[in-house]
Image: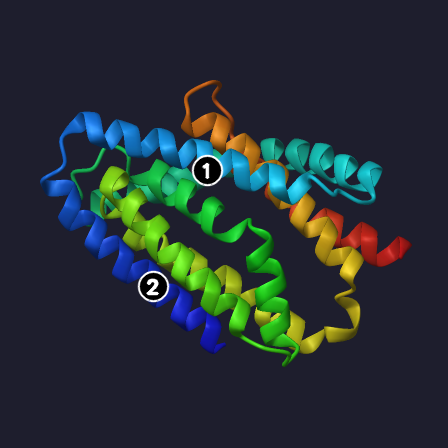
Amino acid sequence: MTGTIVNTGAVILGSCIGMILKKGLAEKYQTVFFQVVGIITICLGITMVYNMQNTIIVIASLISGALLGTWWNIEQKLTTIGDYLKKKLTIGNARFSEGIITAFLLFCMGSMTFLGTIQEGTGVSSDLLYTKSLLDLFSSIILASVFGIAILFSAVPLFIFQAGITLLAMQTADFMSQEIINGLTSVGGAMLIALGIDILGLKKMNVANILPAIVIVYIILYIVK
């Protein structure tokens, strides 16, 4: 679990630095940072789906996951939780909920998240999560310079998500095949492309509604492979 703890700490540190920078950052520079985040997110997503395997299964998982997530209205529920926290903590940030959701998806949907937590959970190594921590440190600085304190709060769902996968890998190491990892990576990549499109304002994408696809692709690949 050390890798996840370090990763969470890196996001907290980066968020604090980003919030300090935000105070002296003109709006035009915040806009540029925001656009850069969107472009980088799309690029990361493309690299993750470039060598997609089990294409039909991935597509089926994305479609069924999106339908299920829309039915459950996950995006709206997460926004409601974010708005509740903002009200309770009297946080004057209009983009608080958007910031938490954006940061969580960006930090947790990458291939390094799945492979890193699985490697740590199966006792291979925490090195990949340490590398991810360094990348997330700089990403959180940029994100916090735009979204402010929301990125600091995103460290909580990040820790829960990564710790959950690590614990799952510890208990089910024999069920984490390379094909499953590839499937999770492809689904995560598709979600990052959608997130990048949303960040750039090209089209509103309720990316959180696609989250069930992560579970669905795991179940399907475990059954058929």
Quarter of the image where one finds residue 31:
top left
Mark 1 to mark 2: distance in Å? 19 Å
Residue type at mark 2? Ala
* Number of marks drawn: 2
Amino acid at circle 1: Ile
Residue 73 visible in the snapshot:
no
How was the colour assigned to the protein in this rendering?
Answer: rainbow
Which of the two discs, 1 and 2, sits closer to the camera? 1
Residue corresponding to mark 1: 40
Residue at (58% x, 74% y) in the render? 120
- 200 in relation to 81, above or below: above
Residue 59, above or below 8: above
Question: Residue at horizontal 46%, vertical 77%?
Answer: 2
Compared to 51, does 203 lie above or below? Answer: above
Viewer-proximal residue among 101 and 68:
101
Residue 222 appears at what percent x and percent y?
A: 82, 58
- Farthest residue, direction bottom: 123
**Is label 1 in contact with label 2 (beta carbons under 8 Å)?**
no
31 on left or right of 73 = left
**Which residue in the structure is indicated by mark 2?**
10
* Secondary structure type for disc 2: helix
The C terminus, quarter of image = bottom right
Q: Earlier in the sequence, mark 1 or mark 2?
A: 2
Q: Secondary structure at mark 1?
A: helix
Q: Residue at x 46, y 27 (%)?
A: 198
x and y, in percent, of residue 29 in the image: 21, 30
Q: Which of the labelled discs sits on residue 204, or is there none?
A: none
Tell me where residue 212 appears, x and y as whole percent.
Answer: 64, 44
